[in-house]
Image (cartoon, helix red, strand yellow):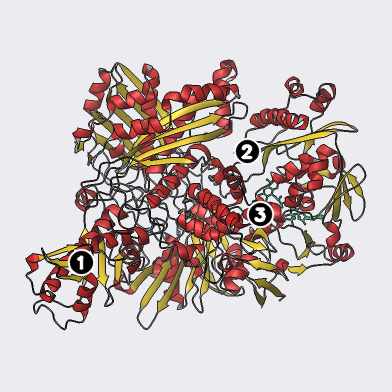
Amino acid sequence: MPQVRMRVNGREVSGEVEPRTLLVEFLREHLGLTGTHVGCDTSQCGCCVVHVDGRSVKSCTLLAVQCDGAEVLTIEGLARNGELHPLQRAFHECHGLQCGFCTPGMIMSALELLQRNPSPSEGEVRAWLEGNLCRCTGYHNIVRAILRAAEEMREAPQPAA
Amino acid sequence: MVEKGIGQPVPRKEDRRFVTGRGRYTDDINLPGQLHAVFVRSPHAHARIRRIDKDSVLGMPGVVAVLTGADAEADGIGPLICGWMIHSRDGSPMKMGTHRVLATDKVRYVGDRVACIVAETPHQARDAAEALVVEYEELEPVVDLATAHDAPARVHDDIPHNLCYDWELGDRAAVDEAFARAAKVVSLDLTNNRLVPNAMEPRAALAAYDPGKDEITLYLTSQNPHVHRLVMSAFNNIAPEHKLRVVAPDVGGGFGSKIFIYGEECVVAWAARRLGRPVKWREERSEAFLADAHGRDHLTHAEMAVDEDGRILALRVDTKANLGAYMSTFSSAIPTYLYAPLLSGQYRIPAIYARVRTYYTNTTPVDAYRGAGRPEACYVVETLVDAAARELGLDRAEIRRRNFIPKDAFPYETPVIMTYDSGDYATCLERALELADYAGFEQRRREAAARGKLRGIGIACYIEACGIAPSQAAISLGAGVGLWESAEVRFTHTGKVQVFTGTHTHGQGHETTFSQLVAEALGVPFEDVEVIHGDTAATPVGMGTYGSRSQAVGGEAILRACNKIIEKGKKIAAHLLEASDADIEFEAGTFRVKGTDRQKTIQEVAFAAYVPSSYPPDLEPGLEASAFFDPPNFTFPSGTYVCEVEVDPETGQVSVEKWVAVDDFGRVINPLIVEGQVHGGVVQGLGQALLEHAIYDRESGQLLTGSFMDYAMPRADHVPDFVVEFAPGSPSPSNSLGAKGAGEAGAIGAPPAIMNAIWDAIGVRVEMPATPERVWRALQSVRMPQAAE
Amino acid sequence: MYAFDYHRPQSLDEAARLLRERPEAKLLAGGHTLLPTLKQRLAQPSDLVDLGAIAELRGIREEGNGLTIGAATPHGEVETSELVRRLIPALAELAGEIGDPQVRNRGTLGGSIANNDPAADWPAGVVGCGAVVRTTRREIAADDFFTGMCETALEPDEIITAVHFPRPKRAGYAKFPNPASRYAVVGVFVAETDDGVRVAVTGAGPCVFRLTALEQALTADFTPNAVDGIEVDAAELNADIHASADYRAHLVKVMAKRAIQKALG
Ligand SMILES: Cc1cc2nc3c(=O)[nH]c(=O)nc-3n(C[C@H](O)[C@H](O)[C@H](O)COP(=O)(O)OP(=O)(O)OC[C@H]3O[C@@H](n4cnc5c(N)ncnc54)[C@H](O)[C@@H]3O)c2cc1C
Ligand code: FES
Ligand code: FES
């Protein structure tokens, strides 16, 4: 079985995997990082979004072996020293989550948006979230949360996540 | 005012674990030595099972067992049940087709469970599921609800016409009489489209058998773990009730679909015992489309009689409801008692008659989905009211005003067995019209026209019956269980409070709102309260969370337990303060001798209760109390939604431009959370109105919209910004909180608001979902009548 | 997914060799068509040959009077490329309308056209621009590349290396997305090129096609009015639960007008 090595949330990890192992399976089953969820089998819901080499991707549509040598960031790696990331805080304060199942993917997706565009409009936020489904919140408060986090991050820029 | 007490927009306690990826959902749990289950599902809508060749897979790598319906029967596993008995008009009981945990004789829908493969890894289980040889004799399926009555085939061989029951409610003669003297009658044929619930977390189950204790623990995506335990032990014979522990950890949304007791969890629990190893099953999304109970699916002919002033005289409704292939846990109640009693809407309607026939078809079972029966009723009423306004040339707000049940008429008895508790419908409507600038709409319509767009405005005034339910009433109407709720509130030595509730939270934020209640009632810091739910071994028996009942019923049980604690606390405080019980008053966490400054905090009293060095001789130590609450009535939230849409006449594309919601939820515990419930409900309603539709192939009975590739879910860019306001409100008299429930309002009121707006924009009524093609065709028919064929 | 062996060649030669040696092997680019297919067990390749490590397949550069885009370039890079926005902005727009941001971060131009899904966007851009598909063996004109539903002129062991897009004088793309999948129900790419006007339609038929009647009409009058005079024959078009054939025929005209409008700026 092939060996994969990658940096996940700043930590070197490695493991033997079958080639057909998806990145999300590697994270959940091998590393126990169950914050990344699986909500569909057609690559559409976005519950599984993580960052690979600084880009948001659907970890259900990527093989673990394709990420050999990559830098992976999951929801578990977002808070620094127990301090929530502004996005995490804003989701909490704006009630941007209900059941919480879509939340990790939403936050990881929004993170790339704010890295690319620190001052998105409401419309740009909505358009960016095309790959993330939420059945609970009606999106309203998710959009609010992302706009609020953007504001906060503009005022106090973050060290690159 | 208590910090983070009732009425304040407190951000939720539960969020931290979710935003940091530390939630714990069923699929996040693994047990040492666990096996993996995969279900072999029927590829046919209707077929006889000739043979299942277990040998075809038994030697395959990792395969531990192949379980079939015959094995389940041999082990005494009972069939699935429907917990609500409905009688037909002629007095005969509903006809229930046997619903086994694994099919034996026939398969009745695409996705029906045929066998369960248990293997060492999920891949191996899937390999074997694919390889299992099953011989079928295909039968003609019954797919179409409209023609199910006369279909040549029968879904259940012993049920003629595929008719489960033919039920009625209301006074038919009075309705006929009112129609005979009406100035105008409007009539409509309405389709309430079939929906797939699609909570983002697919269902999952993980069961382990402990031979030492002879006990099964089942981790399950459940909205009501106690009901699961009850049914699975009493009817499915999985284990005696005290030997079955059901744990519903974090649950990723339910909307009804995780209320029901499905075959999968029964098989998983049974397999764990039979095989002596933990067994895990996790649903794929494409499996969920087939296997999770669907919602809605009604065909209705509805008529409304009005006088020349637009006053409603009577309503006549004839509905065919699709049951799918089998009855599901509550499926008989949804198109009957959760539907027809709401047909009075917010209006004074002297006479109402409803007839409901429910049919089996070779499709996925249909049961409660957010709103459950009430959205269907609201859609009928609010569409008819718009139709009547058009017929009479009346303003659509005005016709509603003329028919509202006035504020001083409560409690108000409708002709369809409901007694509305309270309401102030006109205030909600007027406020919504004001926020929506209803008066200025024609200007916006003209502006849109100048941009080539058709703009329309729609109103819907909804009523909901929440807080299910008064047990006696429910049982007299056929419910198989009481629908009270329970709670236990317990102080610890150090003055912290644990609240054990029989409800379950899967997004509603009970950990926060219940903490607010307790903080307010006991005067303890919000942070000192911990809410525990979802584990039958830890929490008192409860009926679970659905029908927006948790706050109104479960919350009241908690309050009552708090009151018992205060009563006991008074006795302890009196002893400590050397006063008489009657002289102790309690306020904001402090027991005080009336008129003095001699006092003890509730934490001091709790400590004294557990370390009773000085203690009333006749009192038990400890400070905890439990309470049950059975409400005297439903609660009746109401509200008005106003929606503006724009239609692109070239493509038929509808966009929702503006949304105003004014809701009367009685007393609101946490406005932040309740607004969130409205947003979510409205968007599910928007999904129903514009996007979502479970479509079956009429010939083969295959589900054509079996994944997110074909079943359109609302996304962030389908949705406008919402204006949500709570009306000053009419607190419910049915519980001391005055809470009414808010979980379903949006899904009930949104579809007619949107559809009425589209009707206004294009001048013709279209069916849900108003897809671009439907809207475009409707426009073609009005613009070029000759080309409409 | 069925089991397979995985290879990550460092060069095109090595990739081509692997394909030749293993007839049941498949190339893996962004994986956003292939992996969902494998997850549903709709294909069973013996090996996957990942193009991800081959640097020469990636990138966007100006070449002659036009653009060359490496086969393994993700849609998102095309969407945000300054070069593309300057030279052929309609392509940036097309790329930006594919799927969602995460799909665009992984899915590639080469994978899209090799797959030739009837509802994919890239085929419209490639045919609309009269582009040339470069492979490990030859150059294939766009008009010859897409041969039928999910079929192309590629040989089994042939690898697309890049696509060269001559720069049109003006071009526009308009798409009517499927509300569920976000693929095109109908997408129309209109371009005025040095060799005349080209109109390519995706989503509507079993395979991308050119609307020659409109090309002729636009040659005479490059305005949205040109669309009014033409007929789109519904008999040739797809019909499914999302759109009937005559609605698609209607949408072709509406999207064509919008694409022309965009081309006119
Ligand atoms: C949720 C979702 C939404 C989407 N929406 C859209 C949309 O709106 N519009 C749209 O156009 N597409 C859409 N797609 C498809 C997406 O653009 C795919 O990424 C693309 O079609 C395939 O590219 P890929 O790089 O992912 O190819 P892969 O999946 O890796 O490969 C696809 C096929 O091409 C072959 N192949 C790959 N590279 C080469 C090469 N260089 N030479 C020869 N053969 C090769 C592979 O062997 C395979 O057979 C969507 C996909 C998803 C998952
Ligand atoms: S799990 Fe749905 S997109 Fe990855
Ligand atoms: S919070 Fe439940 S799916 Fe988004």
Residue found at x 92% / y 54% = C137
CA–CA distance between discs 2 and 1? 69 Å
- Can residue B138 be seen here? no
1 or 3: mark nearer the eye: 1
Residue at mark 3: chain: C
Relative horizontal placement of residue B353, taking residue C166 as reference (left or right): left
Judging by the rendered image, the residue that carries numbered circle 2 is C240
Judging by the rendered image, the residue that carries numbered circle 1 is B590
SS at circle 2: loop
Q: Would you say the residues marked 2 and 1 are in contact, meaning their CB atoms lie under 8 Å apart?
A: no
Image position, residue B386 (x, y; %) = 39, 26
Image position, residue B723 (x, y; %) = 44, 40
**Quarter in which the C terminus of chain C is drawn:** top right
2 or 1: mark nearer the eye: 1
Q: If you read the primary sequence from the N terminus, does the residue marked by circle 2 or circle 3 appear first?
A: 3
Judging by the rendered image, the residue that carries numbered circle 3 is C102
- Can residue B357 be seen here? yes
Mark 1: C-beta under 8 Å from nearest atom of ligand 3: no
Q: Would you say the residues marked 2 and 3 are in contact, meaning their CB atoms lie under 8 Å apart?
A: no
Residue at mark 2: chain: C
Q: Badge 2 local density, few (<14 within 10 Å), some, or many (20+)?
A: few
Residue found at x 70% / y 52% = C104
**Amino acid type shown at disc 2:** Asp
**Quarter in which the N terminus of chain C is drawn:** bottom right
In the displayed structure, would residue B127 be above or below residue C173? below
Q: Nearer the viewer, residue B778 or B756?
A: B756
Residue at mark 1: chain: B
